[in-house]
Image (cartoon, rainbow, N blue to C red):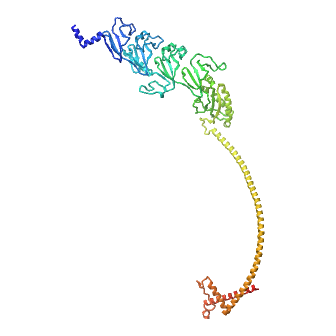
């Protein structure tokens, strides 16, 4: 007792009492305790079991939560603490059970058992839980799971409890596979990056497995009964009728299997939304939705369904058309719009229902690319030309006949390459053989009209409407090695001929214009002459009136002049008579004055000298000349002749005297005459 008291009173003794006798254990609240019973009076576990349910020795089903626990002495129990299982927000966790009933042969995943999200291991095992990978998944949250029984694989961790290295390596491989397939994230269909609000908890679109396309999800199920022979698409199961909510788009695996869902690629697709789908159970492939643009219809070729009854009748033997839902070409085409169709079960052939153009022109193609394999047609004319003829064809397909076109040819490209191209080529080769090159160039409009009518009649047999046939400019084969292009030479001749015709027409127009100009000039001249004639008549009348006026005026002037002349005559007579009387009186006075002067002077020569002095005094000429001319006398000095000045003066005086006398005599004579 003494030694017992000493032992109990020491810390070691206290520890021995707490753990060995009382069996007190403490579990942190962030962890759980996995109980391993070292020995038991109930014996050991059954063969193949690793979890004890009836107190047997071994790993126990019920784990210890956080806190103090009694009754687990060290000499009988070993407690293994492991962390709580944590699944991040918006993420999923996958579970693998080490113990339970074995899987059936047709099973891939263990059936789901209600067990409080794998936290009640005993219920799982007693309720028929199966070992292996589980169909049920864990959503976001924290779970106290016995990881000795359940291995939980999350995006960040592998909660494997007590595991060997080989097991842990296998679990990590599963984790990597799930991460590669974005299995820890829900499936998001029809995701639009513009509507996502990013925050600290949101990863990138790539990490979340998001797609920015307007898409749909194609589901492939890995569990359940296999498909029947000959089938490759699993039928759609579940509906909303009679209170049957269905399998919630493959999220309720047990309900899917209860509705006899089959494994394999599913006919049903996922539309816009978020789906928490176990990737061990089903994988999802994102595909774009089917878009039928305006101007087209979508002819559906179904690879799924029961064999349908042909609805085309006995006269149409190019294939079968079936009703909607049957296998084959559906009689009813889809109108323009957007559809969530499974591309593995249904194929959509777009058929244009508006006018579209096909070009048989080398190196050219339209945006629809139906004519990318077409080229200019080589032809031979009747005059041995070998051009390439470019053509354009405007076509239209009735939307109600679009399924017949697809049923007969498969698609529009095959229709063009296998039917339209051979018919068009043969037709224009026949036309070329009966036409010259010049006719192809100059009668193109007529050829186009005939071709439109003839090809339209032929194409109607194939449910095609020919709107127009358009012929381009024939061209020489580029492989032609001749130095001069024969077609270009023909074009030159046509240009010259056309130029000559234009010149002839121009000359004719010019001649016509000249004739019209001549007529215009004649009309203008006639108009001008008419004006002149009218003006002349008016002037004649004016002149006549003016002449009459002038005649009257002349007569008046003549009468006036006569009157004036008569008056002037009488005045002149009177004036003459008066002047004569005056002159007579003046003459008599002047004669008397002259006689008195002569008598006073006593010599007529003195009278003349007086007159000359008077004239010289009134003269404007200088009395003394600037130059003196001396004229010689008749005798020399010895002969006693006078000086040159004396001789000149004497001569001048003699002349003046003579002239004066003559003048005087003349005046006197005139006076006498007047008197007479």
Pick the quarter of the image with the C terminus. Answer: bottom right
Q: In the image as oriented, which residue stretches furthest toward the left?
A: 2
Residue 453 horizontal side relative to residue 196, left or right: right
Asked if 437 appears above or below 89 in the picture, the reply is: below
Image check: 96 left or right of 8? right
> Which residue shows up at 75% across the image and 82% down it?
577
Q: In which quarter of the view is residue 83 placed?
A: top left
Q: Residue at x 48, y 16 (%)?
A: 252
* Residue 10 % position (x, y): 23, 13
| Percent coordinates x, y for residue 346 in the rendering | 56, 21
Position of the N terminus, as image quadrant, is top left
Above or below 496: residue 642: below
Query: Going 63% across and 35% down the picture, which residue do you hit?
Result: 472
Kindly indicate the quadrant of the structure image that contains residue 102: top left
Classify residue 250 as left or right of residue 533. left
User: Going 45% across and 11% down the picture, which residue do you hit?
Assistant: 103
Viewer-proximal residue, 494 or 89? Answer: 89
Q: Position of residue 237 (x, y in %)?
A: 53, 15
Q: Is residue 568 above or below residue 120?
A: below
């Amino acid at each position: 007792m003494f030694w017992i008291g000493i032992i109990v009173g020491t810390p070691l003794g206290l520890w021995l009492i707490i753990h060995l006798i009382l069996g007190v254990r403490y579990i942190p609240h962030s962890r759980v305790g996995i109980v391993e019973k070292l020995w038991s009076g109930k014996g050991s576990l059954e063969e193949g079991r690793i979890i004890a349910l009836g107190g047997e020795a071994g790993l126990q089903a019920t784990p210890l939560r956080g806190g103090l626990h009694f009754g687990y002495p060290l000499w009988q129990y070993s407690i293994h603490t492991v962390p709580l299982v944590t699944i991040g927000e918006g993420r999923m966790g996958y579970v693998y059970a080490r113990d339970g009933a074995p899987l059936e042969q047709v099973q891939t995943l263990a059936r789901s058992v209600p067990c409080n999200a794998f936290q009640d291991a005993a219920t799982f095992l007693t309720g028929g839980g199966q070992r292996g990978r589980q169909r049920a998944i864990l959503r976001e949250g924290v779970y106290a799971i016995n990881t000795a029984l359940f291995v939980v694989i999350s995006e960040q961790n592998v909660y494997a409890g007590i595991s060997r290295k080989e097991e842990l390596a296998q679990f990590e491989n599963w984790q990597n596979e799930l991460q590669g397939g974005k299995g820890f994230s829900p499936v998001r269909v029809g995701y639009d990056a513009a509507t996502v609000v990013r925050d600290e908890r949101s990863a990138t679109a790539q990490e979340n497995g998001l797609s920015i396309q307007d898409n749909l999800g194609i589901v492939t199920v890995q569990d359940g009964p296999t498909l029947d022979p000959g089938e490759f698409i699993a039928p759609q199961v579940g509906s909303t009728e009679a209170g049957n909510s269905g399998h919630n788009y493959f999220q309720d695996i047990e309900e899917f299997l209860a509705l006899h869902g089959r494994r394999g690629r599913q006919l049903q697709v996922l539309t816009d939304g978020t789906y928490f789908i176990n990737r061990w159970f089903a994988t999802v492939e994102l595909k774009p939705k089917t878009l039928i643009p305006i101007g087209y219809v979508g002819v559906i070729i179904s690879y799924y369904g029961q064999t349908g009854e042909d609805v085309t009748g006995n006269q149409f033997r190019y294939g079968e058309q079936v009703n909607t839902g049957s296998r084959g070409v559906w009689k009813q085409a889809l109108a323009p719009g957007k559809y969530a169709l499974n591309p593995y079960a249904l194929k959509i052939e777009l058929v244009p229902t508006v006018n579209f153009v096909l070009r048989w022109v080398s190196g050219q193609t339209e945006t629809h690319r139906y004519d990318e394999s077409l080229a200019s047609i080589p032809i031979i004319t009747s005059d041995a030309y070998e051009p390439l003829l470019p053509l354009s064809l405007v076509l239209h397909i009735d939307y109600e006949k679009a399924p017949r076109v697809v049923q007969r040819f498969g698609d529009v490209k095959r229709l063009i390459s296998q039917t339209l191209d051979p018919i068009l080529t043969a037709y224009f080769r026949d036309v070329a053989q009966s036409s010259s090159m010049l006719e192809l160039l100059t009668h193109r409009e007529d050829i186009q009209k005939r071709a439109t009518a003839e090809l339209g009649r032929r194409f109607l047999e194939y449910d095609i409407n020919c709107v127009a046939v358009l012929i381009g400019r024939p061209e020489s084969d580029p492989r032609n090695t001749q130095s001069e292009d024969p077609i270009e030479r023909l074009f030159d001749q046509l240009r010259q001929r056309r130029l000559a015709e234009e010149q002839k027409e121009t000359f004719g127009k010019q001649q016509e214009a000249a004739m019209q100009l001549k007529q215009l000039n004649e009309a203008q001249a006639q108009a001008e002459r008419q004006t002149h004639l009218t003006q002349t008549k008016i002037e004649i009348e004016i002149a006549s009136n003016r002449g009459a006026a002038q005649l009257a005026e002349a007569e008046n002037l003549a009468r006036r002049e006569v009157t004036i002349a008569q008056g002037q005559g009488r005045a002149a007579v009177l004036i003459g008579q008066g002047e004569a009387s005056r002159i007579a009186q003046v003459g008599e006075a002047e004669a008397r004055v002259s006689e008195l002067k002569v008598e006073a002077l006593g010599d007529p020569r003195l009278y003349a000298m007086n007159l000359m002095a008077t004239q010289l005094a009134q003269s404007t000429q200088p009395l003394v000349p600037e130059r003196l001319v001396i004229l010689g006398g008749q005798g020399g000095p010895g002969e006693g002749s006078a000086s040159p000045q004396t001789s000149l003066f004497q001569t001048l005086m003699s002349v003046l005297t003579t002239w004066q006398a003559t003048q005087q005599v003349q005046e006197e004579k005139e006076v006498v005459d007047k008197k007479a």
